[in-house]
Amino acid sequence: MIGLHLARALVQAQYRVALVTGETTFWPHQPHLSHRPALLAAIARMGVEVMEADERGGIAAIETGASGLPARRVLFRDGSDVYGDLVLTCMGLAPSLEFMMGSGADIERGLLVSPSLRTSDPNIYAAGDVCQIWTPEAHRYRFYYGYKNVRAMGAIAALNMTGGSEPFLSTQDEELRINHEGMLDSPFWEYE
Ligand SMILES: Cc1cc2nc3c(=O)[nH]c(=O)nc-3n(C[C@H](O)[C@H](O)[C@H](O)COP(=O)(O)OP(=O)(O)OC[C@H]3O[C@@H](n4cnc5c(N)ncnc54)[C@H](O)[C@@H]3O)c2cc1C
């Protein structure tokens, strides 16, 4: 959301804005591949130049620009490039887990927990962004983004560590949409 606001403001101020896309462009959303062209088209309608990195073999390097040219150069593996005054790299979040090292609880990118939010140590439960929760439908551990999920996890973990057996079930709508103005809209974004 913040990135889109920034892009919109820069376009309005007559700057050229290019978005180099990748697998996690819509993170934390994971739109179906068939939905992706429409979502990218919505970004292009904002006046942002969309460049699919995969179509250029991926990003090879982000370098200092040459003399007389903008300060940064993004070089693609097919030899093409794009110059810019500024390159903003965006990536997903990784929870801070150093304090759990040596605890014995299983960790992948987050603390691995069962649907009841219990870690591999039966005496340790977890809630929040730190959790990677076993999700039987997806057959994998996954993160659940957003404050509504995190708040629900706190209640479930408290219940289960005091003898309950409630599974965490996300009620958060996760679909990234295009609104009636043709702009991207996420159920994670809330405006006052
Ligand atoms: C830029 C940004 C925008 C977001 N926008 C949205 C949004 O629009 N809508 C939405 O639903 N969600 C949004 N989120 C996600 C939401 O903020 C998180 O899901 C939520 O804050 C997670 O809560 P938490 O309690 O698990 O972790 P946090 O809120 O991260 O709290 C963890 C706390 O633990 C502290 N800590 C870490 N390590 C230690 C340690 N060793 N000892 C003591 N303290 C420690 C940290 O300093 C921090 O204060 C956004 C997140 C970010 C980063």
Image (cartoon, rainbow, N blue to C red):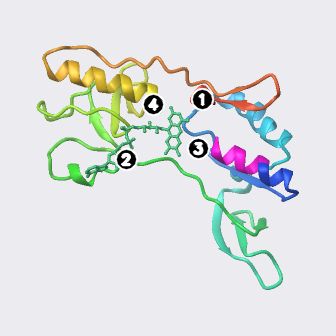
Mark 1–mark 4 Cα distance, whole angstroms, equals: 11 Å
Per the image, the residue denoted by label 4 is 147
Residue type, mark 4 in image: Tyr
Per the image, the residue denoted by label 3 is 24
Query: Where residue 57 sits in the image (x, y, percent)?
Result: 69, 56
Mark 2–mark 4 Cα distance, whole angstroms, equals: 15 Å
Q: Earlier in the sequence, mark 3 or mark 1?
A: 3
Q: Residue at x 83, y 42 (%)?
A: 46
Q: Is the distance from the Cβ of mark 4 to the nearest ligand 1 atom less than 8 Å?
A: yes
In the picture, the disc for residue 190 is 1
Q: Which quadrant of the figure contains the N terminus?
A: top right
Per the image, the residue denoted by label 2 is 95
Up the image or down, 86 lies above or below 14; here it is below
The quarter of the displayed image where residue 27 is located = top right
Residue type, mark 2 in image: Pro
Number of marks present in the image shown: 4
Residue type, mark 3 in image: Thr
Q: Is the distance from the Cβ of mark 3 to the nearest ligand 1 atom less than 8 Å?
A: no
- Nearer to us of marks 4 and 3 is 4
Question: Badge 2: few (under 14), some or many (20 or more) residues near its Cα, within 10 Å?
Answer: some
Q: Residue at x 82, y 29 (%)?
A: 182
